[in-house]
Amino acid sequence: GTPDWDAIFYSIYPNIVRFDLSNSQMAGTVPTALPTLLTYLSLLNNQITGTIPSTFFSNVIASYLEIQLGSNLIEGPLPGDLFEPFGVSQSLNHLDFALNDNIITGTIPPEIFMPLEGLGMNYFQATWGGNVFNGQLPETLIPPNMLSADATLSLYWPSAGLEGTIPPLLFGNL
């Protein structure tokens, strides 16, 4: 059957920090919300379906977070308020979020990274290629002061379906 994420994350393993089920031929839907203490989740190369809910990061308090959801069957558009919880917590300084090789559609919401403004993160990677995005990149994708001066930034979006030129204000005031 499909995993009961609430039972796994909140009853059976409430203090889980690292959870790796990569390449396990697991089916099921995307978790509604990640557990509070989680720093690493890999469901890479399975048959996870559904959409990424706006509540996905709502419980996370970690300053370091690596989420690997690539090579699944995740679909639908990304919610514009996906990263909203991090703007409230102000603690995130490392985020690696892989959604590559799924069936995610729609445009990249122009406001998606705005809650990360002012965090001064040291590392940010979004591996989102191999999806079915469409439209133009937002005029300002990376908000001012989202990254520290010596931060590593990686936007890996080959075959993402986006078109046009990279806007001159794509990276705001880094």
Image (cartoon, rainbow, N blue to C red):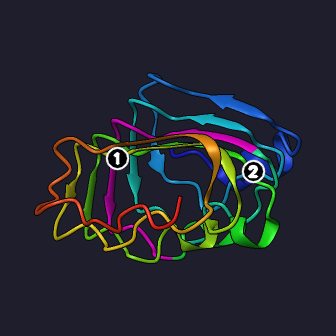
Q: Residue at x 16, y 44 (%)?
A: 159
Residue 143 vs residue 86, the one in the foreground = 143
Mark 1 residue type: Trp
Left or right: where does residue 56 sit relative to residue 140?
Answer: right
Is residue 35 part of the magenta span, yes or no?
A: no
Residue named by callout 2: 7
Left or right: where does residue 173 sit relative to residue 151?
Answer: left
Magenta residues (range): 64-80
Q: Residue at x 51, y 65 (%)?
A: 173
> Horizontal and vertical percent for residue 79?
45, 73
Seen in the picture, residue 64 relative to 59 is either above or below; the reply is: above
Left or right: where does residue 101 sit relative to residue 117?
Answer: left
Crowding at dot 2, Cα within 10 Å, few <14 / some 14-19 / many 20+, comes out as: few
> Horizontal and vertical percent for residue 158?
21, 41
Counting residues from the start of the chain, the first of labels 2 and 1 encountered is 2
> Horizontal and vertical percent for residue 6?
72, 55
Crowding at dot 1, Cα within 10 Å, few <14 / some 14-19 / many 20+, comes out as: many
Residue 21, numbered label: none
Q: Nearer the viewer, mark 2 or mark 1?
A: 1
For the residues bearing labels 2 and 1, Cβ distance under 8 angstroms: no
> Horizontal and vertical percent for residue 144?
56, 68
